[in-house]
Amino acid sequence: MSERVVTEIAQRAAGYRPQLDGLRAFAVLCTVIHHWVPDVFWWRTWFPFGVAGVRLFFVLSGFLITAILLDQRRAIEAGNQSRGLSLRHFFVRRVLRLVPAFYLVLFVGSALDLGALRETLYWHLPYLSNVGMILDGRWLPGITHLWSLAVEEQFYIVWAFVILFIPRKGLVPAIGTAIVAAPVFRGVGVAAGWADMTIAFNPIACLDTLGMGSLLAVLFRGEGGERGERIREPLLRACLWIGLPLLIASILGEREFGEVFRRNVNLPMQEFALALVFTWVVARAAVGFRGPIGWVLENRVVVSMGMMSYAIYLFHPIVAKGVVRWLAVGWTYWPKVAMSAFVTISLAWLSWQFIETPARNLGRRFLYVKPNPPD
């Protein structure tokens, strides 16, 4: 089988479109703004950049991973491959895609004694960063962002078994239960007086964004049958027209009422509003935005940044600390940002070229879906 055919199969299985990479670029830009731009800039407080960036990544992950698993499920039901083979190939490809660059950051950061990596390495190695931070109860400068990568890995492990083993009629109810569980969990946490970190870093608290992406994959893959086809467009419009006003109200409410509103209203509900809005955005990008938005999302520079977004996300907080410590001592703010951006993008490019791409090429030997033999 030619490399081109293998690539096309992999892209179809993932529901790939260049605009999804464009969305990744904007997701990582939001997280960079959150970590690098202080609140003294007026525009920084007008949008929840950090929350939005991570939640856009979650919706994208839920959509793409569930699409892959649904295609594997169809192959299993058609008798073309076993569940064991599907799980093995799925997990091997996830490991090859994510672990090499992640471990490189862990070991290099520990060697340079950046952030608190050295003293907390035992939590990060098994992708339990979020658990370690919840138990420790403190933010870890430079490496707090690793919590979201741990949540995604935990989601992949559980979700593979959910999608491949649950009866077909239970798919949508299971996803719906996950979506509802997240804001309920966050609300219970607020009412019980739990710390923000204990609430937000728990995988259950992230299931509305991950679950909405998964529901979108079910609708796109036709798993909802004729009824799913009928309700897809009305549902997506409802996501936009309900989610957008909720999001605007959450932003304005926090500006007007401050910490009390953020804690009691936004912590339980703002992420659900983002889940609704981003579900519509991801759906439109999967089909293909037209006009200026489509042009921006398919711009070669934007797509390239999206392809390197994983490494950019990994490196940017640690690089910023290193730049401040060693490369830009005594510099003013914007030169530090410029130097941090240059170093981050350079490292991300090196990671993409020499670590992630070779690992992805190796992963292509483990096809998600075995092609049907020719007649």
Image (cartoon, rainbow, N blue to C red):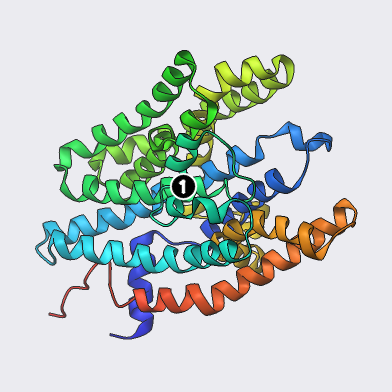
User: Given the image, on which type of amino acid does mark 1 rest?
Assistant: Ser
Q: Residue furthest left?
A: 79
Taking the image as shown, residue 357 lies to the left or right of residue 329, namely: left
Viewer-side residue, 280 vs 321: 321
Viewer-side residue, 65 vs 235: 65
Mark 1 element type: helix
Residue 276 visible, this orientation: yes
Taking the image as shown, residue 211 lies to the left or right of residue 338, namely: left
- Looking at the image, which residue is at 54% across and 24% down? 267
* Residue underneath mark 1: 129
Viewer-side residue, 199 vs 213: 199
- Looking at the image, which residue is at 42% across and 73% down? 360
Measured as percent of width and height from the top left, residue 208 is found at 42, 34
Measured as percent of width and height from the top left, residue 165 is found at 16, 47
Judge the density around disc 1: few (<14), some (14-19), many (≥20) Cα neighbours within 10 Å.
many
1 over 279 or under it: above or below: below
Q: Image quadrant for the N terminus?
A: bottom left
313 over 208 or under it: above or below: below
